[in-house]
Image (cartoon, rainbow, N blue to C red):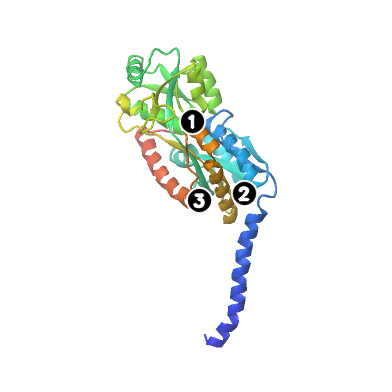
Amino acid sequence: MKLQPLLKLLPALAAGTVWLGATHAWAADAFPSKPVKILVGFSPGGSNDVVARLIAPKLAEGLGQQVLVENRPGAGGNIAASAMLGAPADGHTLLMCTTGTLSIQPYILKSMPFDPEKDIAPVTQVVNAPYMLLVNSTLPVKSVKELVAYAKQKPGEINFASSGTGTGGHLAGEMLKSRAGIDIVHVAYKGTGQAMTDLIAGQVSMIFDQPVSSMQYARAGKLRALAVASPRRLAAFPDIPTVTEAGVPDFDPVTWAGICAAKNTPPAVVERVQREVAKVLAMPEISKRLAADGLEPVGSTPEQFRAFLAADKRKWGRVVKDADVKAE
């Protein structure tokens, strides 16, 4: 191409660059134009629900629009994810995405109602969420060692609850079953709330759950916290040992919760939501509340969250294979 015609094109190219930049900025400025909805794939009272409702009011202040939390329980979070994907991809409908939905379900279901890698846009990881092992207060055990010994005396009689097949709590129980050599039976619920009700009533014997939704019952004497399912003791509960300390090696089924959007959501909108969530997580009153509940605030960028998801999926894929978990 000759130099003179190329020079004539430069103003148009420059104008196009400015227009694209203005469009990107406009997308961020125009969002949100109405209330934002965060879908939670589990019943009220669970850890994901608690975290979503904790950050929603402050997020609403940052976005300048009401932020609503709506529970769509069932199918290990897939009902909520499908509902989010069925809404316009404009950022006004978001998903409280979880370990079970994005990292575990692809390995245990014959077919997913969506492709976690292609259909989901990672926005930000909100928290890391180590599990607590809790038992019904009438169960005659006060440590993991006693629980293992008791379960070996009564093979097939001890059951454990989870918020659904393929959730992190389910696989944590399967991991304990495999590595401790005990025969315990899984009972799946559609959310943590009903699981807790039945655990307190003695319908089930134990559960792996985040402290945010369970420690209140332990403090009230309705449940007994035996151990933390993480590599280290939690700062908020320094007197509660880890499962590994009880002799179960390499036991760290730490899960997470994050915010996800639908594919094709404008990048500017995704970035705006991430920035506002990160600001909320950095607020002292929010970060202290999360830490007190045994949760670690994160607030990663979309790129960081995407890389984390790839590694997390590989980790849980190995756990599913080792435990031979099948969809019900």
Question: Of the residues shown, which amino acid type is indicated by label 1?
Answer: Ala
Residue that mark 1 sits on: 292
Residue depicted at x 45% and y 30%: 169
Residue that mark 2 sits on: 91
Residue depth check, mark 2 versus mark 1: number of the one nearer the observer: 1
Q: From what the image shows, is residue 312 above or below residue 303? A: above
The circle on residue 302 is 3
10 Å neighbourhood of mark 2: few (<14), some, or many (≥20)?
A: many
- The one nearer the camera, 75 or 254, is 254
Q: Secondary structure at mark 3?
A: helix
Name the N-terminal-most of marks 2 and 3. 2
Q: Is residue 293 left or right of residue 22?
A: left
Q: Secondary structure at mark 2?
A: loop
The circle on residue 211 is none
Q: From what the image shows, is residue 254 above or below residue 62? A: above
Disc 2 + disc 1, Cβ < 8 Å: no
Rendered location of residue 277, percent (x, y): 56, 44
Residue depicted at x 54% and y 20%: 197
Question: Of the residues shown, which amino acid type is indicated by label 2?
Answer: Gly
Rendered location of residue 173, percent (x, y): 40, 27
Q: CA distance from mark 2 to mark 1?
A: 30 Å
Name the N-terminal-most of marks 1 and 3. 1
10 Å neighbourhood of mark 3: few (<14), some, or many (≥20)?
A: many
Q: Is residue 89 left or right of residue 248?
A: right
10 Å neighbourhood of mark 1: few (<14), some, or many (≥20)?
A: some
- The one nearer the camera, 208 or 87, is 208
